C-alpha cells in the first residue's frame, strides 16, 4: 500500500498529543517525542510519534551495530529505538554481571506503521491506512482512570555506602587509575497498574526538557525527561553535547542568578566539563575528517526547571569512510555517563555500582529517511515493566579528586527530585 500523508487542523494540539499517546499505547511499540525547551543549540527532538512496528530489529545475531548499519543502508525509512549501555561489551573487552531490574533488549529498533507529526495548529498523519480514520480514533480516545503514583522506591545503597564508595573511587583517582568517573545509584520498587502516559505527562510538566521521550517496546516503558543530547547527524555534520556541571535553582530571581553565576565560575565543574569535552573530541575524531572537530561552545550554562546545567557543544564533519552507525559506535557509551579514561572507568563502574545500567545511560532516538539521526542520553528517566510491575530509575554524578562525597550524594537526590515527587504523589495536581 502507498503511504498517505494528510494534515488535520486542531485547536488544542497539546490535548491531542496526550490522546495520541493513549491511542499509541494499544500497540506493541511506540516512540513519542515531546521536546519542551527553547533556545537549545542545534535544536531539540522533533515533535513526533512513531506508532506500531512494521519491522523490528532486536538483539540480532552477531554484531548489533553491523546489523543496524546494514538495515539503515538498505532502507530509507523512519527507524525508532535504543542502544543499551551494555553494548559497551561488544565494543570493548568488558562484562556486565550486576542485577538488571528491568530487562530491556541491549538494542532494539522498529519501523513504525503510523507517523504523527505535530505542528503549532494541527498534525500531519502519515500512514498506509486511512489518515482520517486514525484521526477520528484518536479524537475518541478516553483517558483511563488508573494512575496511582504511590510506591516506595528504595535505593540500592545507603547514604553511608554511597559516600564510602565515592571515597574509594577517589583513591583510584589519587593513584592515577582514572581522572573522573560517573558513579550512579539505582532506585527500584513495585507499582500496581500505573498509567505510563500520565506519568510521562506529569514528569514533563515537572521537568520540561529538550529530549523527553515516552518509549514502549512490548511490556516495557521508558518515561524520560532527558536534558542531554548524545549525538546528532545533520547531513555531514555530527554534533555531541555533553552535560557536566549542575547547580540547583535559587528560590528567588536574585538567588537563581547567583547560583547560575557560581556554576559558570566553578573551577571544579569546569574541570569536569573540560575532561569530558576532551574525551568526546577524541570520540568524534575517530569518525570525522581530520581537523574538522571543533568546540562550538564551552561551558555554556542553560537553565531547566529544577537545575542549571553546564553544557558544551562539539561538532565535526563526517569522514565518508565511516557510516552513520560507525559514528555512534565510535562514541558509545557517551563520555558524560562514563568518565576518563573510558575503558578503565567502565571496569570500575561494573565493580562498584550495584545495578546493571541496561537502557539507563544508553540512548533513545531515531533515524530519518535521509539517514540523519538524533539520540539522547537516557537520564532523568523512569523504567516500568507492566508484566512484573517493577519500577526503577537511576541517578549519578561525576566524581573527581576534588569532589565532596556528601555534596555528590545531595546532587544525586537533586537529580532524582522530579521523579521522586511524581512517584510519591507530590505536585500531581
Image: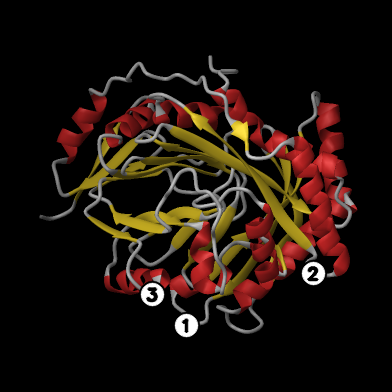
Q: Residue at x 64, y 43 (%)?
A: 395
Is 337 left or right of 403, judged from the image as shown?
left
Q: Residue at x 22, y 33 (%)?
A: 135
Cα gap from disc 3 to disc 2, whole angstroms: 32 Å
Q: Secondary structure at mark 1?
A: loop
Q: Quickly name the residue at label 1.
A: 320
> Which quadrant does the N terminus fall into?
bottom left
Residue 419 placement (x, y as % from top left): 58, 31
Does residue 347 sit above or below 122 in this rendering? Answer: below
Which numbered marker is on residue 177? 2
Residue 269 placement (x, y as % from top left): 82, 52
Cα gap from disc 2 to disc 1, whole angstroms: 35 Å
Foreground residue among 234 and 397: 397
Cα gap from disc 1 to disc 3, whole angstroms: 17 Å
Is 323 left or right of 346, judged from the image as shown?
left
Crowd class of label 1 (few under 14; some 14 to 19; many from 20; radius 10 Å): few
Q: Circles 3 and 2: CB distance less than 8 Å?
A: no
Crowd class of label 3 (few under 14; some 14 to 19; many from 20; radius 10 Å): some
User: Is residue 89 at all visible to an observer of this figure?
Assistant: yes
Q: Secondary structure at mark 3?
A: helix
Q: Quickly name the residue at label 3.
A: 66
Does residue 182 sit above or below 129 in this rendering? Answer: below
Which numbered marker is on residue 175? none
Q: Earlier in the sequence, mark 2 or mark 1?
A: 2
Snapshot quadrant of residue 140: top left
Amino acid at each position: 500500500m502507498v503511504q498517505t500523508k494528510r494534515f488535520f487542523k486542531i485547536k488544542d494540539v497539546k490535548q491531542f498529543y496526550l490522546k495520541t499517546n493513549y491511542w499509541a499505547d494499544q500497540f506493541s511499540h511506540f516512540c513519542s517525542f515531546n521536546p519542551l525547551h527553547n533556545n537549545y543549540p542545534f535544536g531539540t527532538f522533533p515533535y513526533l510519534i512513531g506508532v506500531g512496528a512494521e519491522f523490528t530489529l532486536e538483539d540480532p545475531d552477531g554484531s548489533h551495530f553491523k546489523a543496524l548499519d546494514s538495515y539503515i543502508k538498505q532502507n530509507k525509512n523512519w527507524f525508532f529505538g535504543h542502544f543499551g549501555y551494555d553494548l559497551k561489551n561488544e565494543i570493548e573487552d568488558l562484562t556486565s554481571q550486576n542485577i538488571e531490574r528491568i530487562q530491556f533488549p541491549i538494542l532494539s529498533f522498529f519501523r513504525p506503521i503510523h507517523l504523527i507529526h505535530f505542528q503549532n495548529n494541527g498534525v500531519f498523519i502519515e500512514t498506509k491506512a486511512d489518515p482520517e480514520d486514525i484521526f477520528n480514533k484518536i479524537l475518541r480516545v478516553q483517558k483511563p482512570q488508573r494512575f496511582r503514583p504511590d510506591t516506595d522506591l528504595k535505593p540500592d545503597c545507603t547514604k553511608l555506602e554511597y559516600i564510602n564508595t565515592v571515597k574509594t573511587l577517589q583513591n583510584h583517582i589519587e593513584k592515577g587509575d582514572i581522572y573522573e568517573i560517573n558513579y550512579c545509584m539505582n532506585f527500584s520498587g513495585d507499582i500496581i497498574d500505573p498509567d505510563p502516559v500520565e506519568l510521562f505527562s506529569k514528569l514533563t510538566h515537572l521537568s520540561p526538557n529538550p529530549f523527553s521521550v515516552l518509549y514502549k517496546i512490548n511490556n516495557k516503558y521508558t518515561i524520560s525527561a532527558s536534558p542531554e543530547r548524545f549525538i546528532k547527524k545533520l547531513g555531514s555534520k555530527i554534533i555531541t553535547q555533553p552535560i557536566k556541571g549542575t547547580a540547583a535553582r535559587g528560590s528567588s530571581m536574585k538567588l537563581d542568578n547567583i547560583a547560575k553565576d557560581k556554576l559558570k565560575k566553578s573551577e571544579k565543574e569546569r574541570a569536569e566539563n573540560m575532561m569530558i569535552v576532551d574525551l568526546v573530541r577524541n570520540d568524534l575524531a575517530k569518525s570525522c575528517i581530520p581537523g574538522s572537530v571543533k568546540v562550538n561552545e564551552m561551558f555554556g550554562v542553560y537553565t531547566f526547571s529544577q537545575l542549571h546545567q553546564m553544557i558544551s557543544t562539539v561538532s565535526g564533519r563526517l569522514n565518508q569512510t565511516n557510516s552513520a552507525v560507525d559514528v555512534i559506535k565510535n562514541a558509545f557509551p557517551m563520555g558524560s555517563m562514563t568518565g576518563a579514561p573510558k575503558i578503565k572507568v567502565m571496569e570500575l563502574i561494573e565493580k562498584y555500582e550495584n545495578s546493571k545500567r541496561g537502557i539507563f545511560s544508553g540512548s533513545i532516538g531515531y533515524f530519518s529517511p535521509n539517514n540523519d539521526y538524533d539520540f539522547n542520553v537516557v537520564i532523568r528517566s523512569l523504567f516500568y515493566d507492566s508484566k512484573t510491575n517493577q519500577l526503577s530509575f537511576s541517578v549519578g554524578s561525576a566524581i573527581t579528586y576534588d569532589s565532596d562525597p556528601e555534596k555528590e550524594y545531595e546532587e544525586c537526590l537533586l537529580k532524582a527530585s522530579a521523579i521522586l515527587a511524581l512517584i510519591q504523589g507530590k505536585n500531581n495536581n
